[in-house]
């Protein structure tokens, strides 16, 4: 199905972790409406219908999204976490789509290679309504200063196995 540039720009505003899902939902809505080209109005309507739950109202009940950040234990030796925390506080970059009532309920390191602490602490946070875990940007980047975490996929799977959504990245 064809997307016009304005519609694509609207789609880009959807957080990366649900963008593919949003794209499919928009195309389905367009097909059902008998449209051959996706225009911004279809994207906006679909976003309002399906993808505005992050930190917003759900059927009259306040839904507070609860998130946690897992970061690299090694990098934490030299990083107090300012970049992650500022990005969350100001709802920038990978936190850009969260509503004002979103709560950061956990901020901890993986405990060191191979990152086994991550899923254990995630389990503790399930009792507190944890919805989403962000893996810090220092775990996901791959350059000379921050080589990619060799256990990232393992850590991710361990968290997802507990039914928690994982987003890669915080402030990069
Ligand atoms: S497991 Fe990954 S995130 Fe944890 S200390 Fe090792 S490299 Fe860093």
Image (cartoon, rainbow, N blue to C red):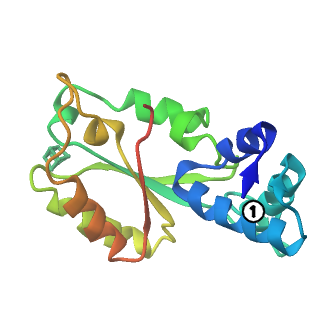
* Residue 98 image offset from top left, x and y in percent: 64, 49
Residue 88 in the image: above or below residue 51:
above
* Residue 9 image offset from top left, x and y in percent: 73, 38
Residue 162 in the image: above or below residue 144:
below
Badge 1 element: helix
* Residue 134 image offset from top left, x and y in percent: 41, 51
Residue at 86%, 57% in the rendered image: 42
Mark 1 burial class by Cα count in 10 Å: few <14, some 14-19, many 20+: many
- Residue tagged by mark 1? 26
Of all residues shown, which one is farthest toward the left?
113
* Residue 24 image offset from top left, x and y in percent: 65, 65
115 relative position to 54: left or right: left
150 relative position to 11: left or right: left
Please indicate, yes or no, whether residue 105 appears anywhere in the rendered image.
yes
Residue at 51%, 71% in the rendered image: 129
Please indicate, yes or no, whether residue 61 appears anywhere in the rendered image.
no
Residue 2 in the image: above or below residue 46:
above
Front-most of residues 99 and 150 = 150
The N terminus - image quarter: bottom right
Front-most of residues 157 and 125 = 157
Instruction: Kindly tell me whether mark 1's CB lies below 8 Å from ligand 1.
Output: no
Residue 66, located in which quarter of the rendered image? bottom right
The C terminus - image quarter: top left
9 relative position to 125: left or right: right
């Amino acid at each position: 199905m064809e997307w016009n540039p304005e519609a694509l720009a609207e789609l880009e505003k959807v957080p990366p972790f649900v963008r593919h899902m949003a794209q499919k939902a928009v195309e389905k809505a367009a097909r059902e409406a008998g449209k051959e080209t996706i225009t911004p109005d279809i994207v906006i309507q679909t976003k309002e219908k399906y993808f505005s739950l992050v930190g917003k109202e759900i059927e009259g009940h306040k839904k507070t999204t609860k998130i946690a950040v897992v970061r690299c234990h090694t990098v934490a030796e030299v990083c107090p976490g300012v970049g992650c925390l500022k990005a969350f506080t100001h709802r920038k970059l990978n936190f850009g789509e969260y509503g004002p009532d979103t709560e950061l309920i956990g901020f901890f390191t993986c405990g060191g290679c191979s990152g086994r602490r991550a899923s254990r602490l995630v389990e503790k946070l399930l009792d507190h309504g944890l919805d989403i875990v962000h893996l810090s940007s220092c775990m996901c980047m791959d350059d000379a200063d921050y080589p990619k975490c060799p256990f990232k996929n393992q850590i991710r799977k361990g968290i997802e196995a507990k039914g928690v959504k994982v987003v890669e990245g915080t402030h990069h």
